Amino acid sequence: MHGRFGYRSAESCLRRDFGNRCAYCGVHEKAIGGSQAFCIDHFKPRSKGGSTNDYNNLYWVCVPCNLNKHDKWPTPEQRRQGYRFADPCREQDIGVHFAGSRDGLLQSLTPCGEYHVSMLRLNRLWLRELRRDRARKQSHLNEALQLLHSLGLALETRPEETFTGVERRMLSFLHQEIEALQSDLAAAISLV
């Protein structure tokens, strides 16, 4: 990567390395319109001395997070007080600097988490809704898995050819429901 826009050649590698998700909010490309709703962010902004073409300073992010972050960077005084962006490539951020609640809000646990969540506006309404939706789907998946397990225990002593039509439909329905929920969760926002 060379020149003012050399970093753009890293797009396909960044998409792969970030799993087609925003490095900051965790939203998957499928949830907001594909890769055209994403861009490359310089973690430490170029205007603040960040390297233009250093792969370690490049993150795959959704456009809303990129617009919110823009060229924000904590002042030396803020950094001394612990206010900074959490670096999702170099540290555990979820559960350390902020945590999710059942209502989809991210709660700050440290000054770093407070700065990160606030500057990136990670409690935007649509992100909270995506987190709540993921929590509902995870709950439904857990319930379907428990029902499948219970049904399996009830049927395990009988040969399959003795299953009634209702039992077969229940098994088929549960398998389809579990597969659909697992597929939805694979692309769901990663924060709960």
Image: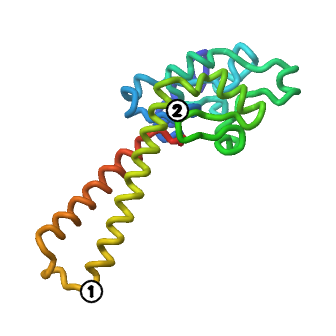
**Where on the picture, by quarter, is residue 67?**
top right
Give the residue at x 58% y 40%: 101
117 versus 73 height, above or below: below
Q: Residue shown at 73%/37% (left/top)?
A: 109
> What amino acid is labelled 1 in the image?
Thr
- What is the secondary structure assignment of the residue under circle 1? loop
115 relative position to 31: left or right: right
Q: Position of residue 8 (x, y in %)?
A: 52, 23
Provide residue 12's location: percent of width, then percent of height: 46, 34
Residue nearer the viewer, 49 or 86: 86
Is 192 on the left-hand or right-hand side of 90? left
**Amino acid beneath label 2:** Cys
SS state under label 2: loop
- How far apart marks 1 and 2 lie (CA) works out to 48 Å
Query: Which residue is painted at 67% across and 38% down in the image?
Result: 98
User: Which residue is label 2 attached to?
Assistant: 22
